[in-house]
């Protein structure tokens, strides 16, 4: 259920390093792959369901 490094890089480049939640720009090592539709709700681990969030935004979102 984890995104591959190559998938995360592709999504990161598509987003131009910008976190869609807070709109700030980050280096890739400051971001984490996130399932748009949660994995536990049937969301797939693929590029279309991946967004790169900064670590703070991803932690705020977790479990909701």
Image (cartoon, rainbow, N blue to C red):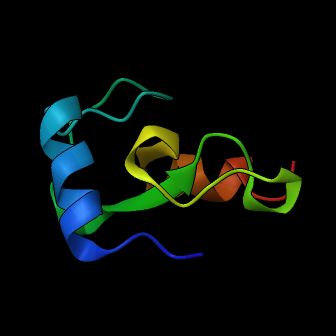
Q: Name the residue at 13% across, 32% down.
A: 16
Nearer-the-camera pick, 7 or 19 = 7
- Left or right, 28 with respect to 34, comes to left
Tell me where residue 59 appears, x and y as whole percent: 64, 59
Tell me where residue 15 appears, x and y as whole percent: 23, 31
Nearer-the-camera pick, 23 or 45 = 45
Work out which quarter of the rendered image holds the N terminus and state it: bottom right
Q: Name the residue at 26% across, 45% down.
A: 11
- Left or right, 39 with respect to 26, comes to right
Q: Quadrant of residue 63?
A: bottom right
In this figure, what is the number of numbered marks?
Answer: 0
Tell me where residue 62 appears, x and y as whole percent: 74, 57
Tell me where residue 61 appears, x and y as whole percent: 71, 47
Q: Name the residue at 12% across, 42% down.
A: 13
Nearer-the-camera pick, 30 or 8 = 8
- Left or right, 26 with respect to 57, comes to left
Nearer-the-camera pick, 13 or 17 = 13
Q: Name the residue at 52% across, 43% down.
A: 49
């Amino acid at each position: 259920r984890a995104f591959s490094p190559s998938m995360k890089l592709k999504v990161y480049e598509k987003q131009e390093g910008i976190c869609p939640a807070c709109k700030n720009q980050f280096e890739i090592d400051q971001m984490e792959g996130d399932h748009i539709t949660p994995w536990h709700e049937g969301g797939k681990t693929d590029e279309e369901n991946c967004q790169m969030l900064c670590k703070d935004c991803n932690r705020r979102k977790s479990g909701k």
